[in-house]
Amino acid sequence: MNIVGIAACTVGIAHTYIAQEKLENAAKKAGHEIAIETQGTIGTENELTAEQIADAHVVILAIDVKISNRERFEGKRIIEVPTEVAVKSPNKLIEKVEKIFEQSNQEREGK
């Protein structure tokens, strides 16, 4: 599964980057491709490309604040959680993403 997302915390320092790292590690451990953009105090880093977004099956928004360019994800399945969830329970979050992805596939196939 291809996952993209954004991490952005209130202060835009620690939790933004910790959430990014935890999500990337959990997704890779589960065998998924992942790219996480950060929107912190120093601006946007690892900005997602249009191609990455188009190829994504799921978008994870681990955010505590309003983010820039959210409209890029229109039409995508979006899971929005506070950064705390990504920091404290990244493996459970990836499991939830997997279940949602499976359910959406079953719905599309009419099962």
Image (cartoon, rainbow, N blue to C red):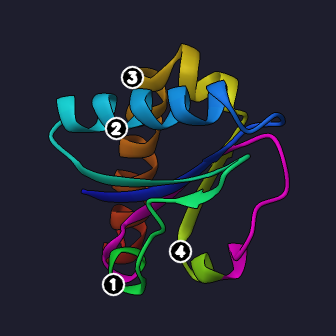
To which residue does mark 3 refer? 91
Q: Quadrant of residue 46?
A: bottom left
- Tell us which disc is closer to us: 3 or 1: 1
To which residue does mark 1 refer? 51
Mark 4 residue type:
Lys
To which residue does mark 4 refer? 76
Per the model, the C-alpha gap separating discs 1 and 2 is 18 Å
Q: Which corner quadrant holds the C terminus?
A: bottom left
- Tell us which disc is closer to us: 4 or 1: 1
Mark 2 residue type:
Glu
Mark 3 residue type:
Asn
Given residues 79 and 47, the one toward you in this image is: 47
Q: Which corner quadrant holds the N terminus?
A: bottom left
Given residues 109 and 71, the one toward you in this image is: 71
Would you call the spot at circle 1 few (<14 residues within 10 Å), some (14-19), or many (20 or more)? few
Looking at the picture, does residue 43 appear above or below residue 96? below
Q: Magenta span covers which residues?
A: 54-71
Q: Is residue 64 magenta?
A: yes
Image coordinates of residue 85 in percent, x first then y, are 63, 24
Q: Secondary structure at mark 3?
A: helix
Residue 39 seen anywhere in this rendered image of the structure: yes
Would you call the spot at circle 4 few (<14 residues within 10 Å), some (14-19), or many (20 or more)? few
